[in-house]
Amino acid sequence: MKKLYFCKMKRYTFYILSMIVVLFFTSCRFQKTLKNSTLDEKYKLAIELYNKKDYNRALQLFDQMMGAVRATDKAEDVYYFYAYCYYYQKDFTMGSYYFKRFYSNFPTSARAEEAMFMSAYCNYQNSPLYSLDQTSTYDAIKELQLFVNQYPKSLRIPECNDLIDKLRAKLELKDYKVAKLYYRMGDFAAAAVSLNNILKDYPETPHKEEIMFEILKVYQRYAKESIPSKQIERYTKAVNAYKDLVREYPESQYKSEADDLYAKSVTELDLLKAKQ
């Protein structure tokens, strides 16, 4: 038993030592190639490192070659792998930039379609939580839509549409949260505008019923807390919002509460009109 254990330890130690030797010589080769080698030698080692998923060191070599290969037959490959090195290291900002440069510099390449998609996909990956700045989200939607227009028969179209839907859902959620914040702050006018804009900007939203109910609730509360001279107008908007809701969703899950808000609005309208 001890002999078997000793043999296993010996093999493991040999493996570790072998790996250290390999890494040492690979590192020496990398440093030598990085500092003083021909373009062909740098390209060969860069591809070798890239295929081993050593993207950091491959990137350093590709970076040195970027200017030198512009007029050579290696230019397309270097730009292509350079962009992917950034992508695989999750630097999606730089990845998007260099994929965009690729399809700008090589528009007739067989890889141009892939690069255009990857530029948009990097922006998709950069899209943050809904509560943060959504510049990358808007950029991703714009680029994905450009891709769909440029390559309408691409096999990537279903994926593009799915990604656009996810990004738009995030923007919709952000707008909805903003509207709810306005409501909690008592800025009912801004809340009403925001909710109506969601229906206008996202007509296919799966949350349409809920948003229509929220509009009714906002108008009723807005009217209730308004000065008397504005109440008739705003209770009327609440009544109309109720009618829109029940016309669209006769069996709405919010109907009980909506009926109550409607009844209160009609009662207040009748009282206000009687005073005139």
Image (spheres, helix red, strand yellow):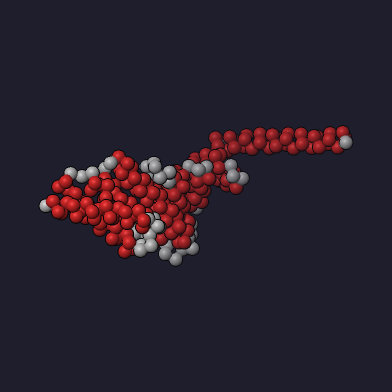
Q: How many marks?
A: 0
Q: Position of residue 205 (x, y in %)?
A: 38, 57
Position of the N terminus by quadrant:
top right
Q: Residue at x 25, y 53 (%)?
A: 265
Q: Position of residue 198 (x, y in %)?
A: 32, 53
Q: Residue at x 66, y 36 (%)?
A: 23
Q: Is residue 178 left or right of residue 4?
A: left
Give the residue at the far bottom of this rendering. Answer: 153
Q: Residue at x 35, y 48 (%)?
A: 176
Q: Is residue 127 left or right of residue 10?
A: left
Q: Residue at x 29, y 60 (%)?
A: 244
Instruction: Evaluate whether residue 55 shows in this view.
Output: yes
Q: Position of residue 77 (x, y in %)?
A: 51, 51
Q: In terms of depth relative to the viewer, which is nearer, 28 or 214?
A: 214
Q: Position of residue 240 (x, y in %)?
A: 25, 58
Instruction: Evaluate whether residue 107 shows in this view.
Output: no
- Tell me which corner region of the image, top left, top right, bottom left or bottom right, holds residue 56: top right
Q: In terms of depth relative to the viewer, which is nearer, 130 or 217?
A: 217
